[in-house]
Amino acid sequence: EDQVTQSPEALRLQEGESSSLNCSYTVSGLRGLFWYRQDPGKGPEFLFTLYSAGEEKEKERLKATLTKKESFLHITAPKPEDSATYLCAAYGGATNKLIFGTGTLLAVQP
Amino acid sequence: GAVVSQHPSRVICKSGTSVKIECRSLDFQATTMFWYRQFPKQSLMLMATSNEGSKATYEQGVEKDKFLINHASLTLSTLTVTSAHPEDSSFYICSARGGADWNNEQFFGPGTRLTVL
């Protein structure tokens, strides 16, 4: 069964304290790995799509990387406004739909 | 990026009533729209996929007679929760995709919080 698992469930950082979020996936025929940001009471906001192992993408303080089994979202020198839930989702060739993880709730304290 | 709106943002209804949620793509034509539900601290679960002008495809375990989906135009899809019960209380999120290709970005709406008393 296709599955996406994110860890940790919650992460509390001090402003400026860099860290990484993990997304492990078991998806047959992975075609794309997506990262989203979700603020409370709102829909997900697209961040990145990664298509193949070894690929990296950056946007401001965020960098996403992909291996054959997992993806990481690295947050460098986070600010309080980076506080949100970060979701990853995998699109598999077998299911032809996005399979979401349960997310990591990130809190960045000033 | 493209904008997807949902209406209402929040609705409270009595058990047994029906509730309609609208999802609109404001600045692009959505070939495909998706409906998700999200319980607190849980992931988004796909309920159904709809293509304009055709019947929706429901995920396993989702009752198509309870969750009626209509995608009548390229900018509007509706989800009607019929005879709602407290267990239907959830956060419903739609998303829209501008093309048939899976690689086309899905834009998500802001969600609708449904509370059934």
Image (cartoon, coloured by chain):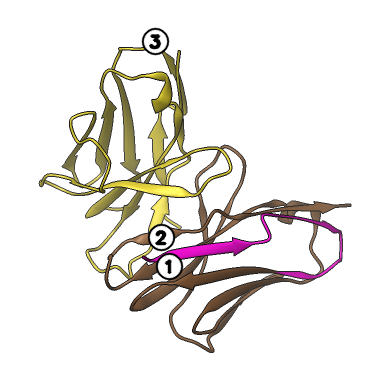
Quadrant hosting residue B116: top left
Residue B57: x and y in percent read 18, 49
In the picture of the structure, the residue carrying the numbered disc 1 is: A90
Q: Would residue A89 be visible to someone looking at this image?
A: no
Whether residue A11 sits left or right of residue A39 in the image: it is: right
Q: Chain of mark 2?
A: A
Q: Residues within 10 Å of mark 3 (few under 14, many from 20)?
A: some
Going 39% across and 10% down the picture, which residue do you hit? B14
Q: Would residue A79 be visible to someone looking at this image?
A: yes
Which contiguous range is marked in magenta? A1-20
Q: Are marks 2 and 1 on the same chain?
A: yes
Chain letter for the brown colouring in the rendering: A
Labels 1 and 3 touching (C-beta < 8 A)? no
Whether residue B34 sits left or right of residue A39 in the image: it is: left
Chain letter for the yellow colouring in the rendering: B
In the picture of the structure, the residue carrying the numbered disc 3 is: B14
In the rendered view, would you say B34 is above or below A34? above
In the picture of the structure, the residue carrying the numbered disc 2 is: A99
